[in-house]
Image (cartoon, rainbow, N blue to C red):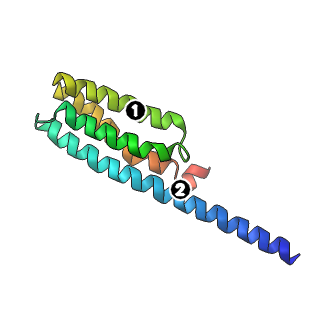
Amino acid sequence: MVKTAVSILLSFLLIFGMSAFEIWYVTDIFKDFRAVLCGLYEKAEGSVATHEDGIAVQRFWEDRKLGLHIWLPHNSIEAVDFQLSEALGYLYEGQFTDALPKIEVLIDMAENIPNVFSLRLENIF
């Protein structure tokens, strides 16, 4: 009986600990990604962003997304990849007014994706 209670308690603590780590990890990555995107947005808004700036953001994302495949559905990550690729295409062509909405969408995604998968009452029911 005592072994069962201890096993249940340890299992609960392990699940709780992994959930807390997941929430922290995903939120931290997207917070950093959002900051990088805001920098790119400001440059694009001032029409001084280059394709290399976009590539730097893409490299930042590529490095960070590897660990996210464990915690997030692949379609969420693919949506970010798609929007980022389109924004890079517009930056390559120097079309800043077309790149700005794509970067705005990425900034919104960086805010919303962690909230969708966090432990909240509205996400449970």
Within-10-Å neighbours for mark 2: few <14, some 14–19, many 20+: some
Question: Is 50 drawn above or below residue 42 in the view shown?
Answer: above
Q: Is residue 10 left or right of residue 1?
A: left
Q: Amino acid at mark 2?
A: Glu
Tell whether label 1 touches label 2 (CB within 8 Å): no
Residue 10 falls in image quadrant: bottom right
Nearer to the camera, 95 or 112: 95
Q: Position of residue 105 (x, y in %)?
A: 33, 36
Q: Residue at x 34, y 47 (%)?
A: 33
Q: Position of residue 38 (x, y in %)?
A: 24, 46
For label 1, the residue is: 81
For label 2, the residue is: 22
Within-10-Å neighbours for mark 1: few <14, some 14–19, many 20+: some
2 or 1: tag closer to the N-terminus: 2
Badge 1 marks a residue whose secondary structure is helix
How much space separates mark 2 and mark 1, taking CA atoms? 21 Å
Q: Is residue 58 left or right of residue 48?
A: right
Q: Is residue 97 left or right of residue 7?
A: left
Residue 109 visible, this orientation: no
